[in-house]
């Protein structure tokens, strides 16, 4: 019915103006434009994403599966993998705690300087990771502000695990908080008020109401945080000292190996990082598809 | 539980939400806080609950000053406007929540909690729904689950914020009757907030009419409808007409026409008249002469807008078969009215 009316209207106009065009919705481009846009998009993706990704795996497997396994099982590389896992295992939980606390403070309470606080949470996104690393060197390094004191107490931060964890925490701390803040703001304080009016303590309210309400959003934030923690290069490169077999993480190891022969060793480690990225992407897509309505991008359940 | 609100004032960021409000609620009473939005009715309810604290004044639960007690310590059953059911819990877990968060010493066993939950589900007429999640329920069902959850903690007082606000008209009416029955059955002191006068008048023992952070009148449905204490109450509850009149020598006059006796000092007044409190007069018997502008038939009566030389009034005439048409000349006289001073 509506289509008929449309056609008539256009035909009428066509009678008045000879240069009549075929009717189509105002928001739709011509087929040619659409095809062109799609082609540009696909070409861009192919050139900058698929091609490098394919290259990583082909190069990694150039010497066959045995060569691939040998490169990964090389002691320094294994140490780098262990280091990366350890750093993520320490940094991510710290950021989960911080992220929940920050989101809870911002979303459920009014206080002075709240918007400044939210802006500060975003700081790591706008600061170059290398600068972040340097700040820690200046603070904790042997000639740094706290360096002498730390040295006299036998604590090494820079060129050791603590420094790497600190730098990683700095770079990744927005992820969990950024995911939770809009989600908690959208949910408001109604559920918490209900829980407290029913006699729940603050902790009971948090554990049984607040946390379950954001669990999928939290998992999403953790996923992104973890991916970044394992893949961070700049900040970690500055603070780790890049000691092979000791303070190298996987991205650093890739960089070192890429200056040596055979190149396939570098690509083998790189392929592990690529796999991690693909796994993260898959999990992220699954979460968005399955629990999208319980995450910040959408409406509350009821 | 008797509740006494004494000289309570509440400011939000120096913006006053309530000015010096006092109210006594009797034990077992069902009371409505009625007013337009911004009248402070929800603020008063939240103050009673302990979700807000008064800037000044006190709130007594029985003989005890509860002003400083938190919502957790006041033992109130609060039903939120949008129910605030815990979406990740089943209906049973929602209802049992208040029992399971009690300190170990007073916490009932899981079996006892379960028994209470099923009992409450029967009470709110939702047996068999204990394993559903809130998203699987209709609005009316959610409302009842929220009520059962609030009742589970055996509250001293039941507080409901716009309990029927989010429901459609039919469900609203049914639930209203049902809530009244439930109240009579359980005898909880109950306070609910509404902006719907019909709801307040039908459901409550007493209605508290509020406007701009003050209580305008407290009384039964008859009190507030038939003996409104202020122009606001008169015009907020039911329909009303306002006629500028002059009192002279014990009579009320409108534009030189005597409307009736008024035992008040001379001077200008505003006369408030309900549409159904006008009588139509046969031609030539005086009264207020006017011209019908609009006539609408609704059920057993006829609503007319009458133009009295520039003053429009709404009157409701019983339908007696005689047709009145726009343009007809008509004479009416108010039968009952209330006079207020010019503001």
Image: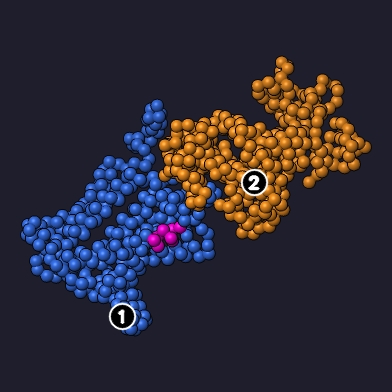
Q: Which residue carries the number 1 mark?
A: A154
Q: Name the chief secondary structure element in magenta.
A: helix
Question: Is label 2 in a helix, a strand or a loop?
Answer: helix
Tell which residue pokes out farthest to the top in this image: B321
Q: Position of residue A292 (x, y in %)?
A: 36, 46
Horizontal and vertical percent position of residue B107 = 50, 48
Can you tell which chain is drawn orange?
Answer: B
- Report the front residue among B62 and B341: B62
User: Quick check: B230 left or right of A102?
Assistant: right
Q: Residue at x 29, y 48 (%)?
A: A285
Residues drawn in magenta: A97-104
Q: Which of these two is toward me, A32 or B164?
A: B164
Give the vertical position of B225 relative to B53 (above or below). Answer: above
Q: Which residue is mark 2?
A: B41
Q: In the drawing, does residue A86 fall left or right of residue B147?
A: left
* Corner quadrant of residue B150: top right
Q: Given the image, what chain letter belongs to the residue carrying mark 2?
A: B
């Amino acid at each position: 019915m509506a289509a008929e009316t449309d056609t008539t209207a256009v035909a009428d106009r066509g009678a008045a103006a000879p240069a009549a065009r075929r009717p189509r919705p105002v928001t739709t481009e011509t087929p040619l434009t659409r095809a062109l846009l799609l082609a540009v998009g696909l070409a861009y993706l192919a050139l900058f994403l698929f091609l490098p990704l394919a290259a990583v795996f082909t190069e990694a497997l150039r010497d066959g599966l045995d060569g691939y396994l040998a490169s990964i099982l090389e002691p320094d590389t294994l140490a780098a993998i262990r280091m990366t896992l350890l750093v993520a295992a320490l940094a991510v939980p710290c950021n989960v705690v911080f992220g929940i606390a920050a989101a809870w403070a911002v979303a459920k309470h009014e206080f002075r300087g709240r918007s400044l606080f939210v802006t500060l949470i975003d700081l790591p996104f706008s600061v170059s990771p290398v600068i972040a690393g340097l700040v820690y060197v200046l603070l904790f390094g042997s000639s740094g502000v706290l360096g002498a004191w730390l040295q006299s107490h036998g604590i090494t931060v820079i060129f050791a695990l603590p420094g790497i964890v600190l730098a990683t925490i700095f770079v990744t701390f927005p992820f969990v908080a950024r995911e939770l803040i809009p989600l908690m703001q959208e949910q408001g304080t109604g559920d918490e008020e209900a829980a407290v009016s029913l006699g729940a303590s603050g902790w009971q309210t948090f554990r049984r109401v607040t946390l379950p309400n954001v669990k999928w959003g939290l998992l999403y934030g953790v996923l992104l945080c973890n991916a970044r923690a394992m893949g961070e290069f700049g900040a970690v490169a500055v603070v780790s000292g890049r000691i092979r077999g000791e303070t190298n993480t996987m991205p650093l190891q890739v960089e070192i190996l890429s200056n040596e022969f055979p190149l396939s060793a570098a690509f083998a480690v790189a392929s592990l990082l690529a796999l991690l990225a693909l796994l993260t992407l898959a999990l992220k897509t699954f979460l968005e598809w399955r629990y999208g309505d319980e995450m910040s991008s959408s409406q509350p359940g009821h | 539980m008797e509740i006494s609100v004494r000289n309570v004032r509440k400011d939000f960021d120096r913006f006053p939400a309530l000015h010096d409000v006092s109210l006594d609620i009797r034990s077992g009473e069902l009371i409505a806080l009625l007013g337009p939005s911004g009248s402070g009715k929800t603020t008063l309810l939240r103050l009673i609950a302990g979700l807000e604290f008064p800037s000044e004044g006190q709130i007594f639960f029985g003989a005890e000053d509860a002003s400083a007690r938190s919502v957790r310590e006041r033992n109130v059953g609060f039903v939120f406007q949008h129910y605030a059911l815990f979406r990740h819990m089943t209906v049973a877990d929602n209802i049992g929540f208040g029992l399971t968060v009690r300190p170990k010493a007073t916490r009932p066993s899981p079996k006892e909690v379960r028994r209470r939950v099923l009992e409450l589900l029967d009470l709110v007429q939702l047996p068999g729904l204990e394993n559903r999640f809130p998203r699987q329920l209709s609005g009316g069902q959610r409302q009842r689950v929220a009520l059962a959850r609030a009742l589970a903690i055996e509250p001293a007082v039941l507080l409901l914020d716009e309990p029927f606000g989010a429901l459609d008209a039919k469900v609203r009416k049914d639930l209203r009757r049902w809530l009244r029955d439930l109240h009579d059955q359980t005898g909880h002191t109950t306070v609910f907030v509404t902006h719907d006068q019909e709801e307040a008048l039908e459901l409550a023992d007493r209605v508290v009419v509020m406007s701009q952070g003050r209580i305008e009148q407290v009384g039964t449905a008859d009190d507030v409808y038939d003996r409104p204490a202020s122009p606001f109450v008169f015009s907020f509850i039911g329909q009303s007409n306002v006629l500028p009149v002059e009192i002279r020598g014990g009579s009320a006059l409108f534009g030189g026409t005597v409307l009736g006796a008024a035992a008040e000092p001379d001077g200008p007044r505003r006369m408030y008249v309900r549409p159904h409190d006008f009588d139509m007069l046969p031609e030539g018997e005086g009264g207020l002469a006017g011209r019908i502008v609009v006539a609408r038939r609704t059920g057993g009566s006829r609503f007319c807008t009458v133009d009295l030389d520039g003053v429009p009034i709404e009157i409701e005439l019983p339908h007696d078969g005689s047709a009145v048409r726009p343009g007809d000349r008509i004479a009416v006289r108010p039968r009952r009215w209330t006079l207020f001073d010019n503001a």
